[in-house]
Image: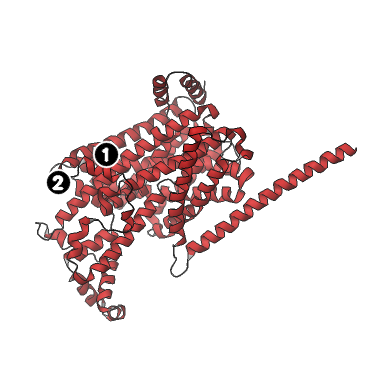
């Protein structure tokens, strides 16, 4: 008996048993929720959690938590549609709803897979060399680590396609990775939290939505801002701009479009049907939401503690003059300090100065302003680990390094599998064999990106991010309409209390995630070109064309059918 058949039998027995037995039966199955949790806990989520903790403190814990709650409702809606129609999201959109939306969603999902996969190799290689195995902290060592990550990812992705023991072992590897990740982060929390001064009440209140993060700077920056004198407004504007951008970006991108289109493929690939919707909901909350919140909140809390340590080390009254006199010679922090000088003497006057005088003026800025510039622009994973590590006992540093490595490696594995499914879906091929393996191996190309493409964020990550973000409001709205479409679902449209909760959650998700995504894309500029507005208008035009072309095609098909019947009656 195949693994899918065994799972279906187990689910059928669970559905006919009591509540307690049903819970334990559900817990035995490794559902797609764990896959989505590991994919969502990527390098981007890691950087977002670190940045939220640094800039907002415990008051930022709500950002990813509530984004995932809203995302769960969207995934629940997709699950309901897929299990009742027994069709993938791409097939439904292409054949029954809006082909333009289906193709854009599939294309942006594939680009997102590539863009998410690329930084994982860099993060894994960097953290292995700098924290876990210092003798690998060189170009050759990092390339070797990236190659090992790639080889193991390919090996495991091939296991996924097999049946029997290898497929079961693949599921257990994912469970062990997620369990090890949660354990490492919670151990670090238990060690560092008691000395941090952060209370349990602070943590709980941090999960309450606080929109003031879009308009107010946290009190932890007050001492630095008060010492900036007449240029306080400049630093407040810089901090608030980055803080607002980080909050909206992290909130909007917690659940990517690649995961939205992948979930039905995972569900249908395992042979699940309408009667398995109870487990599907359980798996979304138990397999995705709880692990994701535990990990992302732990990273955010650790970032808050690291930020406290940084402020202590850079305090001018501390015994760390090396940190207090930090002056960058290049990069975005240096550029921001140059902007600060231009505010003082004027842009033309600054540009007219010879380079050595420009550097001299930057070096004479106060330590507090240099620290502010670093806090505005800098979110460094290695620095985060170093600030949390005890110099006498580096166990925390090792645990955090292992956590980052697990996040990077598991994301690569999951994205390779998801991309294999996506390629098969686009080509209309069975989800196995050469098409699936080719789709999985396609992401192997992303392993070379971090080592030969120094500007990958500007030319890969950012464009792919905004292409995906642009489609999100349209996709979320379509899920709500599809969920209540009598033509699509008939009697299976959600009803009663469960239907009310699902529809309400999906509508709130559209209002919050959709509006924040639309705002970010609409206001995105490429130099002086409003590229975001152009993208939204172009996308809206394509979606209208796709909707009416499919509607006309269906109408023409019906008319042709009626004419055929009339002809047969005449004959």
Q: Nearer the viewer, residue 85 or 378?
A: 85
Q: How is the image coloured?
A: secondary structure
Point out residue 541 in the picture as x, y percentages from the top left corner: 59, 58
Who's the residue at 47% across and 35% down the image? 158
Q: Which residue is mark 2?
A: 391
Which image quadrant is residue 366 in?
bottom left
Q: Nearer the viewer, residue 99 or 217?
A: 217
Pick out the residue farthest to the right.
571
| Mark 2 nearby-residue class (10 Å; few <14, some 14–19, many ≥20) | few
Q: Which residue is mark 1?
A: 185
Dot 1: element: helix
Q: Nearer the viewer, residue 39 or 455?
A: 39
Q: Which image quarter is the C terminus in?
A: top right
Relative placement, left or right, of 515 versus 200 is: right
Which image quadrant is residue 246 in?
bottom left
For residue 79, which numbered disc appears in the image?
A: none
Q: CA distance from mark 1 to mark 2?
A: 19 Å
Q: Earlier in the sequence, mark 1 or mark 2?
A: 1
Who's the residue at 51% across and 28% down the image? 276
Asked if the residues shown at circle 1 and circle 2 are in contact, with their CB atoms under 8 angstroms apart, the answer is: no
Dot 2: element: loop
Point out residue 514 in the picture as x, y percentages from the top left corner: 46, 51
Point out residue 170 in the picture as x, y percentages from the top left corner: 42, 31
Total numbered badges shown on the rendered structure: 2
**Residue 205 appears in the figure:** yes
């Amino acid at each position: 008996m195949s693994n899918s058949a065994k799972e279906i039998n187990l689910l059928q027995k669970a559905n006919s048993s009591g509540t307690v037995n049903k819970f334990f039966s559900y817990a035995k199955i490794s559902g797609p929720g764990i896959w989505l949790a590991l994919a969502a806990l990527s390098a981007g989520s890691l950087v977002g959690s670190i940045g939220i903790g640094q800039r907002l403190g415990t008051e930022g814990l709500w950002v990813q938590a509530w984004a995932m709650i809203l995302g769960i409702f969207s995934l629940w809606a997709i699950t309901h549609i897929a299990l009742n129609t027994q069709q993938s999201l791409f097939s439904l959109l292409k054949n029954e709803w809006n082909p333009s939306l289906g193709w854009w969603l599939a294309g942006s999902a594939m680009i997102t897979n590539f863009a998410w996969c690329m930084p994982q190799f860099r993060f894994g290689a960097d953290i292995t060399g700098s924290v876990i195995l210092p003798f690998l902290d060189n170009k050759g060592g990092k390339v070797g680590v990236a190659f090992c990550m790639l080889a193991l990812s390919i090996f495991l992705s091939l296991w996924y396609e097999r049946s029997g023991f290898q497929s079961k072992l693949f599921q257990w590897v994912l469970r062990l990775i997620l369990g090890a990740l949660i354990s490492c982060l919670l151990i670090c929390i238990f060690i560092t939290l008691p000395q941090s001064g952060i209370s349990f009440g602070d943590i709980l209140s941090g999960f309450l939505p606080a929109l003031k993060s879009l308009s107010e700077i946290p009190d932890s920056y007050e001492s630095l801002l008060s010492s900036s004198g007449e240029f306080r407004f400049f630093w407040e504007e810089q901090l608030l701009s980055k803080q607002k951008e980080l909050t909206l970006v992290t909130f909007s991108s917690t659940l990517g479009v690649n995961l939205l289109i992948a979930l039905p493929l995972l569900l249908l690939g395992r042979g699940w049907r309408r009667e398995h919707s109870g487990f599907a909901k359980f798996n979304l909350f138990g397999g995705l939401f709880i692990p994701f919140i535990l990990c992302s909140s732990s990273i955010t809390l650790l970032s808050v503690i690291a930020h406290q340590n940084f402020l202590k080390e850079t305090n001018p009254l501390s015994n760390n003059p090396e940190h207090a006199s930090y002056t960058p010679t290049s990069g975005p922090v240096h550029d921001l300090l140059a902007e600060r000088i231009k505010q003082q003497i004027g842009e033309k006057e600054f540009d007219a100065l010879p380079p050595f005088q420009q550097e001299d003026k930057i070096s004479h800025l106060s330590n507090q302003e240099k620290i502010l510039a670093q806090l505005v622009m800098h979110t460094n994973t290695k620095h985060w680990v170093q600030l949390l590590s005890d110099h006498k006992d580096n166990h925390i540093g090792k645990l955090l390094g292992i956590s980052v490595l697990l996040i990077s490696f598991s994301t690569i594995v999951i994205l390779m599998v998801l991309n294999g499914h996506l390629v098969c879906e686009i080509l209309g091929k069975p989800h196995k064999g050469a098409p699936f393996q080719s789709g999985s191996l396609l992401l192997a190309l992303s392993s070379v990106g971090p080592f030969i493409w120094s500007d990958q964020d500007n030319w890969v990550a950012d464009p792919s991010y905004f292409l995906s973000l642009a489609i999100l409001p349209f996709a979320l709205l379509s899920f709500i309409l599809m969920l209540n479409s009598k033509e699509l679902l008939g009697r299976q449209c959600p009803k009663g209390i469960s239907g009310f909760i699902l529809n309400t959650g999906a509508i709130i998700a559209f209002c919050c995630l959709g509006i924040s995504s639309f705002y970010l894309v609409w206001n995105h500029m490429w130099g002086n070109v409003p590229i975001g507005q152009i993208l939204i208008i172009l996308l809206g035009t394509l979606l209208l064309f796709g909707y009416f072309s499919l509607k006309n095609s269906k109408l023409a098909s019906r008319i042709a059918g009626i004419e055929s019947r009339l002809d047969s009656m005449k004959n």
